[in-house]
Structure formats: C-alpha cells, structure tokens
Image (cartoon, rainbow, N blue to C red):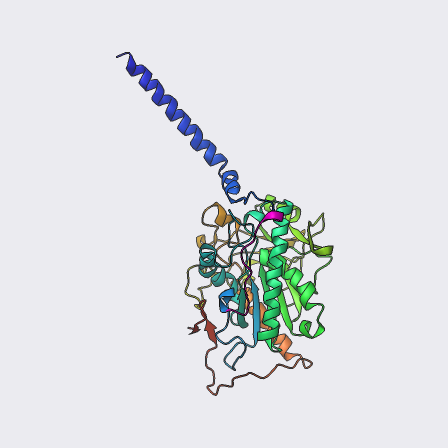
Amino acid sequence: MADRPIRRWIIWVLAALLTLLATAAFIWRDDILRTTLDPKEPFQIYSPPPAPDYSQRAAWALLPAKPEAWSTNDPPADVFFISPTTFNGGVHWNAPINDTKADRLFRRMIAPNYVGPFQRAGRLFAPRYRQASLYSLMTLREDAREARRFAYADVAAAFRRYIQAYNNGRPFLIVGVEQGGTLAERLLAEEVVTDPALKARLAGAYMIEAATPADAPPITPCRQRAEAGCLAAWVSAFDNDPQRAKDVVDRSLVWAAGAQLENLHGRLPLCFNPLFGATTTALAPAKLGLGAANATGLEWGARPPFLTRQVSAQCRNGVLRISRPKASMLKPQGDWADRQKVPGYNLFYADLEADAMARVATLLADPNYHQPAPAITTSVALKPSPVHALDGRVIRRP
C-alpha cells in the first residue's frame, strides 16, 4: 500500500513535465521550426543543386506549347513571371528545381492566384530557378544574402533565353512576387534599362510584395493605368498590424552598388495602389475594387469567382495599408511556414488583370511601336485564346 502514493506522485511529476514540455514547444514553436530549416552550413562551402538548362522544357514551370511561335489566337504580349518563395529549406540554402513539394505549391496556389491575373494579357513564361529558401528570407545573415544573390543568376539566364529564343520582338510584362519581385528589380536595372530596344517593348513591370526604394526605382513608377513601360511596386500590411508595417521598412532588403543586398536604412519603399492603378497616397475605398479571389486549387486556366468591396487601400509611409477583407476565404491559412509565404488568395486579382491589359493596350496603341506579325495566322474569328496548362498542354478558356 505504501507504494501507491509514490506511484501517484511519479505520475503527477511526469504529467507536469509533459505539460511543461508541450507548453514550451507551443511557445517556441516558431523558433524550433526556424531552426529545422537552417542548413547549418556556411554558404561559402555549400554545394548548390545543379543549374537548370533553360533550353529544356523541364526548366520552366510555365511555357507555351510552341514558345518560339505565336498565332492570332494568342494574347498580344508575353509575361515573364518570377515566382515567390515555395521552398522552405533544411538541407539547402537554394532550392533544387525539381523539389516536388515546392512545385506542388506553385501549381496549386501560386500559379492560380498570382500568374492567373496576367494570363489574358500575355503568353506565360515562368522559369524554375534555384530560389533562396524560406529560411534565407527570415534572417539577415550574410549566408542568406548570398543565397538570394545566387538565385538571381538563374533568373537572368532564363530571361536571356526567353529574349533570344522566344520573344521575337513581342511586347512583354515582367511580374515578380515577393522574392521574385526583388529579383525583378535587378533584372529591370541590368537587362532591360540597359537595352533601349528591349525597354521600348516593356509594357509594364510588377513587383508584388517586394520593396524598391522610392527615391531610386529601376524604371519610372506608374502614375495611371493608361501608361506603358512603368513600374508597379508595393509591399503591404493590414491596417491593424502596425508591427508588420514597421518590419516591411526595417527588414526589407534592396539592391545596392556591386550587386549587394542592403536594408532600406530609413528610405521609403515605392508604393503602388492596385485599386487606383497608380502610385499615389490617396485613399482607395473598397467600392473601387474590381474583385478579389481565392483561386487556390482551381483547375489551371479556370476563371475564379470574384468578391467585390473587400478591402480599402492607401499608401502610407511607403507601405500599402489594407483593411481586413470581409470574406473568410480571404484570410491567411495553413501552418506556420505557409503563413510566412505570400497568401493563398489575391486581394487585387481583377484589378491587376485590368491593369496589365490596359498597359499592353497602351503600348500597342503607340504609333511609334510596331507589333511583329504572328508566326501563325488563324482564320477563325472570335476564337478564345489558348491557355497553356502547367504541363505544357494547350487548354481552352471556359
């Protein structure tokens, strides 16, 4: 009988320890997960995954069935899309281009929500690249900056391949989201601005959720929708999240001399308001929104249902401050790592679609611009433009 109180005491102690461990794991879960994503190897001795070969279809997440030719059924421009972060990290500082989990995220969430708004404006070219891991975007260590600089070389190589083999004088848009937006800034500065003939074919550039200094953008900021060859760039925070707005300014890295990445150091980011289609500090009420969408999981090429009057937006101190959306489907979801990436919805889906099409139309209407003739002429009038599936097949718009 004397053993019973001892056993009970041991059970209580074990239960208390388990409760303490569970509580500690919950409190420090972010730090624990962050630690598991750390490659724990200096970038200087890191062996990156093999380089992609952009002459091969496998190196592209999105590529037209016949990228070197186009027909009258195709949209009038091209879209070069640079993906946001889809690779968490762990063993690698930079993602292998054949990582199945990252590719699945691109197909299920990134493409429907962030490429989708541009598919009516242009043929789609989205390279797979050895992107910096999610972990590298969560630390300011020099290793992480090296990983982000390393990723740029792939994007530049893919863009050169696109221009040399597939563009053939067509107008184009550059779209980069989050990490992809930061890489787009350098691409504009080094590959587009330095080539007058190429710059003349740029219908517009979008740096979505990516900071660029307002006092030194790579190209002229967009002031209205009926304007071509300009830059729409912004980073956002919800109105009731002042810490996020502060972090955007304090922690965002931008390109500096010598291809270095540095903090903004008190400089304000450029702020474009998608509801106005302009870089402005005016308040855009929710009634201006053409439609938000959650396209995650939709069949590629399907047009998502739009939700109107969801958010107001205003640029304040270089950050696009957005009201909380009303619909539950437009709220962050997923695990901790998912919530560190761009959300699985697009609050400005229809606004960006209209914006991109307007900028392409403005460029094509310029009497000084000469659109090259299509390689293939079709005779069927009003035939819907083809959409290229994520595996390269051609599907039709509904």
Residue depicted at x 56% and y 65%: 81
Task: Pick the residue in front: 244 or 49.
Answer: 49
Residue 209 in percent (x, y) is at 59, 56
Residue 50 at least partly seen: yes
Of all residues, the one furthest to the top in this rendering is 2
- Residue 279 visible? The answer is no
Residue drawn 29% across the image and 14% down it:
3
Please tell me whether residue 84 is drawn above or below residue 201 in the rendered image.
above
Position in image of residue 212 (x %, y %): 67, 56
Q: Position of residue 396 (x, y in %)?
A: 43, 74
Is 51 contained in the magenta span? yes
Q: Nearer the viewer, residue 309 or 94?
A: 94
With respect to residue 351, does 26 lie above or below?
A: above
| Residue 195 painted magenta | no
Looking at the rendering, the stretch of residues picked out in magenta corresponds to 43-56
**Front-lying residue, 397 or 287:** 397
